[in-house]
Amino acid sequence: MRKITIIAILLIASCQTNIQHKYGHALIRVHDKYIPLYDESFNIIDSIICDIDKDLVYGIQVLEIKQNYAHINADCVFGPSDSDFIEKNGWISLNYLGVNPAAHELVLRKRPSDRSKIQSIIENAQWGDLYEVKDMYKGWVYIDVRINDTQYSGWISPVQLCSNPFSPCS
């Protein structure tokens, strides 16, 4: 009986850990402007800038989301040598992060699951639209956007997203 109780506790703990684990990939939505990076106490520790003309474009991995801020790892390769590499880590306001659609028809779901109910569909989505990230969970991205007087909100599957800043994923 004691073994069953211990196994049950371990299973519950692992499920809770998985539920709280949020992550995904995104792009910086704002160009040619320094964006502050914060530490865990929300003191400014650095900044990040996206400048396509200078090939300063970061790949963003979101590690965690809390109170409209994302804990990120940002990587930028801007030249041919290993010294032409910038890596930054910190917290950034979510409103600076966006995702590109990889499909022309984006299916928005009620929950981050392929089995979840479809809330709406964005037709004629184009790479470069960069929808603002509101939340993330295991690669799924929640958006809430107004397009031509219609409000769209829901979770987008990772297979419908493109984190390449230079060309569409296809």
Image (tube, rainbow, N blue to C red):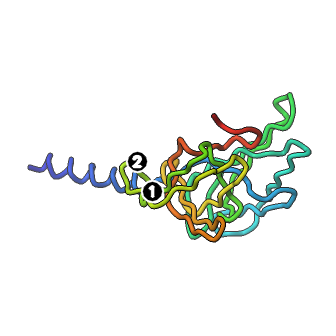
**Nearer the observer, 161 or 81:** 161
Indicate which disc residue 8 carries. Answer: none
Please tell me which residue is depicted at 49% across the width and 54% down the height of the picture. 137
Amino acid bearing label 1: Arg
Counting from the top left corner in percent of width and height, residue 53 is at: 91, 45
Task: For the residues labelled 1 and 2, say whether their Cβ atoms are less than 8 Å apart.
Answer: yes
Residue assigned mark 2:
114
Counting from the top left corner in percent of width and height, residue 29 is at: 74, 57
Please tell me which residue is depicted at 85% across the width and 61% down the height of the picture. 33
Work out which quarter of the rendered image holds the C terminus and state it.
top right
Indicate which disc residue 109 carries. Answer: 1
Counting from the top left corner in percent of width and height, residue 155 is at: 49, 56
Crowdedness near tag 2: few (<14), some (14–19) or many (≥20) residues, C-alpha within 10 Å: some
Q: For numbered disc 1, what is the local secondary structure?
A: strand
The span from disc 1 to disc 2 (Cα, nearest Å) is 8 Å
Please tell me which residue is depicted at 61% across the width and 46% down the height of the picture. 104
Please tell me which residue is depicted at 56% across the width and 44% down the height of the picture. 160
